[in-house]
Image (cartoon, helix red, strand yellow):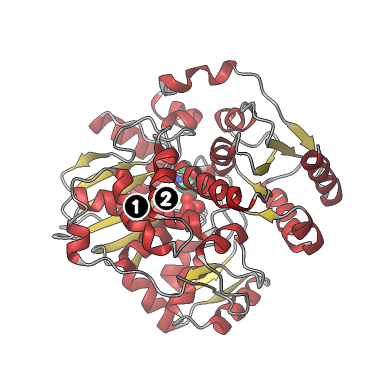
Amino acid sequence: MKYISTRGTAPVLGFGEAMMTGLARDGGLYVPQTVPQMSHADIAALAGLSYEDIAFRVMYPFLGDTFAEDEFRGLIAAAYEPFGHAARAPLVQLAPNHFLLELFHGPTLAFKDFAMQLIGQMMQAALAKTGARITIVGATSGDTGSAAMEAFRGLANVDLFFLYPHGRVSEVQRRQMTTPVEANVHALALDGDFDDAQARVKDMFNDFAFRDGVRLAGVNSINWARVLAQVVYYFSSAVSLGAPHRAVGFTVPTGNFGDIFAGYIARQMGLPIDRLVIATNQNDILHRALTSGDYKTDGVKPSISPSMDIQVSSNFERALFDAYGRDSRAVTQLMDEMKSGGFHISQGALQELRATFASGRCSEAETTATIIREYGRTGEILCPHTAVGVKVAGDHLGAVPMITLATAHPAKFPAAVRDAIGLHPDLPPRMADLYDRPERLTRVPNDLAQIQTLIRERIAS
Ligand SMILES: *Cc1c(COP(=O)(O)O)cnc(C)c1O
């Protein structure tokens, strides 16, 4: 099993190396050279299995010889053991042909736990074999950082640093990052916004002396191993609703296009997915691109669904790579044009994308209205990101069952919920003491050299 870069000039890697590398050295994203297939019979055989067993069968063919079968089963078990629901990713019904896939029963209450918990286990297992240590650095607007701190805390061969914009994440998100007590995880509150945090992380990866010196690794949403872990719940939910004997559709609240790209991979593997609907908030670059063919940045407009407030969608490059017939030169050219604000998607590529993806946009007022309406109609309290998905899914309902991904627990975004329905959603009992735990964080200036010095000092001590 080999992984190639969308830009065509980085080394071809195995699964383990692609996981440790994250962003390819040519600036591209790793994708499998060929996507393993699951036959009708293979998919039918998933019916009734546990989430962990489905995870094993779906992911193992992508791993090459990275882990032995039993070892990988053990890593999956450890990854999902801390979840607060026996089904891991349960479905609930909203309307006759509309289902919600609850992806918020992990330790930090957002879908990112599915990938982060597993990548933590896989990285630690791979490193333990050689005794090597790595330093993970990332930027977060909230959910990625909390999921990463939780997944990597206490792991022996990893130091983890996450930069978040000081004062601009929700209190629950901040506390989830600042309350782990293990010394190998570090929350860094940057004086700047999320774009500054992301830019400093990029600078560190582009500083090859630093990158190699501290053995830098990334776990942001472009990491192939994260995409892979997310493929599993597309299978588990579709099979619950009758796949492979009948098709299903999915609507995915989308920011960086990682979660929905996992659905695209599931479809490539043979899962009968009718359509994948991209749901954006007012940061609608993807909806505009699918509609007009123009992929153009338009600044970030802060919204009540902040985990989807993006300027560009990093994983979209993977979909473009396929839509352009895996032409890495064409992709490299598009990404060059991106530096001056955007590009136009060719007619052929647009047709390819529209064969798989539909899209819709949800305004701030519609997000709030959807939380109010669904609470009244079903008693379900939606997080604002999930509400974006439910609104857009409502415009795409038809004969095929629609599954909307519920990406976070409402208690993670209590302000938006309170403003809509006047209720403060409670944290699950297992984390009810979050507000009482002591916090630990380091304020850092928006200055590359000072951040690098701090990281070097911390990992040396
Ligand atoms: C990260 C996140 C998203 C967006 O997911 P992408 O993979 O970036 O498209 C949506 N909702 C929530 C709650 C998130 O944390």
Q: Nearer the viewer, mark 1 or mark 2?
A: 2
Q: The C terminus appears in which quarter of the rendering?
A: top right
Mark positioned earlier in the residue sequence (1 or 2): 1
**Can you say whether 391 is above or below 42 in the image?**
above
> Residue 277 or 396: which is nearer the viewer?
277
Residue at point 38% right, 57% down? 59
Res 29 label: none
- Residue, disc 2: 72
Q: Residue 319 at what x, y percent from top left?
A: 45, 70
**Can you say whether 147 is above or below 349 in the image?**
above
Distance from Cα at disc 1 to Cα at disc 2: 7 Å
Q: Are marks 1 and 2 in contact (CB under 8 Å)?
A: yes
Asked if the beta carbon under badge 1 is closer than 8 A to the nearest atom of ligand 1, the reply is: no
Q: The N terminus appears in which quarter of the rendering?
A: bottom left
The image quarter containing residue 420 is: top left
- Residue, disc 1: 56
Residue at point 81% right, 48% down? 452
> Residue 216 or 411: which is nearer the viewer?
216
Q: Residue 445 at what x, y percent from top left?
A: 82, 41
Residue at point 45% right, 26% down? 418
Q: Residue 227 at what x, y percent from top left?
A: 46, 57
Identified by mark 2, the residue type is Phe
Could you say whether the residue bearing mark 2 is in a helix, strand or loop? helix
Left or right, 17 with respect to 368, comes to right
Other-residue count near label 2 (Cα within 10 Å), few / some / many at <14 / 14–19 / ≥20:
many
Left or right, 182 with respect to 206, comes to left
Could you say whether the residue bearing mark 1 is in a helix, strand or loop? helix
